[in-house]
Amino acid sequence: MLDVAIRRRQGSFDLDIRFQAPIQGITALFGRSGSGKSSVINAIAGLAKPDAGHIRLDGTVLFDSAQGIDVPAERRRTGYVFQDSRLFPHMTVVNNLLYGMRRVPERERRISLDPVVELLGIGALLTRKPHTLSGGERQRVAVGRALLAQPRILLMDEPLASLDAERKAEILPYIERLRDELNIPIVFVSHSVDEVVRLATTLVLMADGRVTATGTVADLSVRLDVGAILGGQEVGAVLDTVVASHDAATGLTALTFPGGTLTVPQLDLGIGQHLRVRIQARDVILALEPPSRISVHNMLAGRIVELGAESGPSRDVKIDLGGSFLLARVTRHSVERLELGVGTPVFALVKSVAFDRVFPGPSGSGSGSGPGPGGRNIAL
Ligand SMILES: Nc1ncnc2c1ncn2[C@@H]1O[C@H](COP(=O)(O)OP(=O)(O)OP(=O)(O)O)[C@@H](O)[C@H]1O
């Protein structure tokens, strides 16, 4: 468990943060610019000292003001990947990689060069100098260097922010592999919803130096107040689905999840594979009766459990599908016209879905953690 409870005053900014996150997987700190995300990871790294509180990692105390403990940064064994790679320009890639490792006594080395090079796909770059690499390649080397310093935790501060969409797409699968194949906790700072949905195991939402919500991506995605925290944009339910069947005749794949089935254009995935999908609230239409003769073929029956606050002309509505939840963004006018309220049975018509990632199932069965169809938004 990563247990953070810190206060720190910096200028006129007041940071007061508490969260606990499991060691497994990626904990994403998500919030607007200036919400205090970097300040939190700087405190974990030992680069900025909190005024009060504690930071514990899997039972090890890194900082505790009450006990007078403040482990110096260089003894915390944190791997830090910055927005810009900060590689040593005069050193080759391999020397950059080995730099941190050489400073760790041999008996304490658990991660060695070859698996890291393989994991990050940087074998062909070893003799090159950083200035000859693309931004994405540089970031992969920076991740490798951080890993080889044998960290107890990997801290990544917007490692993809300086990359264009193509380079991001190139590096995301590698970060997924770190998450799924290495047993190192990762704290990942981001202000991109796409990145967070795809990568995060645990989400810590931050605003104005405070934690506003903590939980899994699927749980937080359907909380109506989260939309407001995220600035009212991009709200949508995240569903963890399983590939149930392919129909060659229609060219469709059925994905099941607790409470329903989605049919999508055929996916190149095996039966039983797990796929995380996101359905944006604005891509869901509500009907009181099952409409006939329409092109949309995903219709999910459910019941309204919550109506969000009015924001402009629209309202977000949360629908219980019987095991999972969906969000729909409808106009205020429609809420009145259809007399939508808590308890109203509805049919949710899904216009489009984004595939976020293939991920190992809860039992590890039928999984593949490869890049999968990631990130595509498909009209249904
Ligand atoms: N050393 C410092 N002295 C005074 N104020 C600081 C210091 N470091 C950060 N701040 C302020 O603390 C606030 C939080 O900054 P921080 O960098 O943690 O936010 P962030 O969420 O990581 O933002 P971004 O996404 O833009 O990197 C900001 O208002 C910033 O100006």
Image: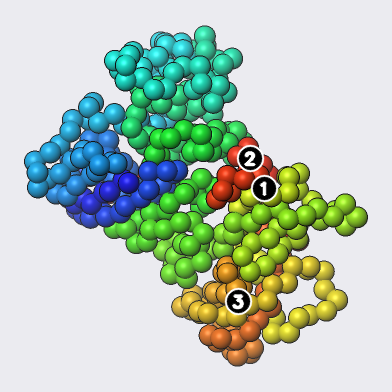
Secondary structure category for the residue under label 2: loop
Whichever of callouts 2 and 1 sits on the residue coming sooner in the sequence is: 1
Please state the horizontal and vertical placement of residue 300, each as a whole percent of the image: 69, 72
Q: Image quadrant for the C terminus?
A: bottom right
Q: Is residue 377 left or right of residue 45?
A: right
CB under 8 Å between discs 2 and 3 = no
Single out the mark in the foreground, 2 or 3: 2
> Which residue is at a point 35% across and 35% down the rendered structure image?
153
Secondary structure category for the residue under label 3: strand
CB under 8 Å between discs 2 and 1 = yes
Q: Mark 1 points at which residue?
A: 273
Q: In this view, does 213 lie to the left or right of 378?
A: left
Q: Mark 3 points at which residue?
A: 330
Disc 3 and disc 1: Cα gap in Å?
33 Å
User: How many neighbours does mark 3 have within 10 angstroms: few (below 14), some (14-19), or many (20 or more)?
Assistant: some
Question: Identity of the amino acid at label 3?
Answer: Val
Please state the horizontal and vertical placement of residue 209, each as a whole percent of the image: 28, 55
On screen, residue 341 above or below 178:
below
User: How many neighbours does mark 1 have within 10 angstroms: few (below 14), some (14-19), or many (20 or more)?
Assistant: many
Q: Mark 2 points at which residue?
A: 368
